[in-house]
Image (tube, rainbow, N blue to C red):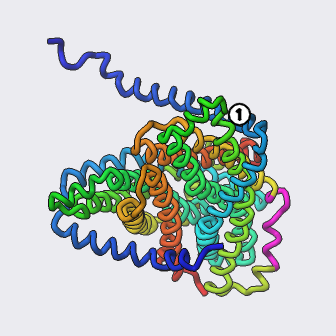
Amino acid sequence: MPRVADIAIGVLWPLRVSAFLARTVVAGLRGPPAKDTLMLTVRLLLRSIPVVVIVTFFAGAMLTVQAAVSLSGFGAASMSGLIVGFGGVREVFPLLAGGSLAARTGAELASQLQAMRVTRQVEALEMMGLDSLQLLVAPRIIACIIGGPLCVVAAMVSGLVGAHIIGVFQLGIDRGAMWGALLQAVGTVDVIVGVVKGLVLGLLVGVVATFEGFCSDETGPRSVGRAANRAVIRSMVVVCAASLALSMLIYGRLVQT
Amino acid sequence: MMSSVHPLSLLGPVRALGRQAIDVVVGFGRVVHFLVVATAHGLREPGGLGAAVQQAIIITSRCALPVALVVGPIGAMMALQSLTLMRGFGVERQMAPLAAAIVIRELAPGFASVVVAMQGGAAIAAELAAMRLAEELDALEVMGLEPRGLIAGPRILGAAVAGPLLNALAIACGITGSYVMAVMVLGVPHTMFVDSLPEGITSSDLWLSEVKTVVFGLGLGAICASAGFHCERSTDGIGAAANRAVVTSVVFVLVANYLLNTALFGLRGGV
């Protein structure tokens, strides 16, 4: 059974994360180191995009197979483009892009910062009168904000490529019918919504991951693994909740009542 | 000095790609070997079954809340998007069965396993890597014990048992999520949702979904345990092992899901 103290910590967690974000924004206003930010962004893209591409390729394939199986009962397998559009482009691909970003870069950022804590490099910086929030945390969060939308765009492209390859070559759905149904379901607006989602999800992954690494008071080498673990699962939960909230906000009004 | 660009150096990327491919194949073989050795020794150890049950309880209780928090919103999203699609055609009645079928067949097993990889799997990798760093695993070997069977085996079996339990929870949460979104937020009649829901749930789908998560649990347990077991001996090595474990198992779940689907529905997907 969770103790009362655990519940209190769980309730306070979002507040602590927002306070951490506010402090980082204030510290980052003095200008994060440009070179570090650039290198971290490049590293994030190089490491996260391949994961995003593989994961969403197979997610697109899975959605197409499911849609074709469900719809072939009505003799409407070519309509599976609709389901890939509504389920994939709008929801599942951005969500999986956020999840892959959390798994690859989120865990990495948290374990880096926690390792710096454990080996007292953060204290050493502060001893020298340097601001660790400005130097270490701000560039990492900025890298995530830049990388998030790019990951989402890569996810959409790769998911659609997966859907196309599986739908057209494996299942033998007519190419024109599938893409016709798909383009009927989604348009440029959905790509823009995806980019907005990517910005928010990138920010959330960055903040949660750096918070878990930077603000933990655990010591010892074991805490490095635990920080990575917390960062991944908490940013995944936050990403899911935020993704639903954004969808409600943007698509909720499209439902005729 | 030789000329700076040797013609063979243009093959660099090709060589790197080849090395990557070889690494994937070798890594796959190593994980399968690790899985067989760990589970076989783990079951043969006295008290191995008890340890596995204990690990299953730990993993299930640690992952239950995150699974509910992740799959609930996903069920709600499915309801939202399929209603935007179906209200236009006037086939609102089909919404509950479609959402339930997709949740049971794909989203619940897939995302429950991803969450198990992120929460339980990363913890397994981090724990084993820390044991490696503290030379606890080496101590076991010196005493003539088999750390793969003793430490990794129960964790892998625990993940394989926790998978289907958490999948059942995920299915319940996903359907509840779509009910909340459809009935309470978007105003689908309660009776329509409840009456049409059973059309989307078949017992064969439920069984297949559970079997899938057993496979995913075994696979991701082996990937995470072997990542922690073979980690580099440094503080950074622990983080790197946890990170590699999570990423590899998430990719594994998605790829294995596709392969299982193709095996189950046939190459043409019943079209």
Residue B96: x %, y % from top left: 73, 73
x, y (%) of residue A173? Answer: 65, 49
Q: Please report the bounds of the magenta region as a residue range.
A: B195-206
User: Where residue B93 sits: x, y (%)?
Assistant: 74, 77
Report the chain holding disc 1.
B
Q: Quadrant of residue B77?
A: bottom right
Residue at point 56% right, 59% down?
A: A180
Measuring 22% from the left and 19% from the top, which residue is drawn there?
Answer: B5
Front one among A223 and B79: A223
Dominant secondary structure, magenta: helix
Residue B262 vertical placement versus A206 (above, below): above
The image position of residue B213, as x and y in percent, is 71, 52
Given the current orientation, which residue lies at the most extreme top position?
Answer: B2
Q: Is residue A91 above or below residue B233?
A: below
Q: Residue at image x 62%, y 48%?
A: B253
Q: Amino acid at mark 1?
A: Val
Label 1: which secondary element: helix
Q: Is residue A142 left or right of residue B166?
A: left
Identify the residue at horizontal 69%, vertical 41% (top origin).
B153
Compared with residue B99, is residue B36 higher up or lower down, i.e. above or below?
Answer: above
Label 1: how many Cα within 10 Å (few below 14, some 14–19, many 20+): some
**Dot 1 corresponds to which residue?**
B36
Residue A123 located within the stretch drawn in magenta:
no
| Residue B170 in view of the camera | yes
Find the residue positioned furthest to the right: B203
Q: What is the quadrant of the N terminus of chain B in the image?
A: top left
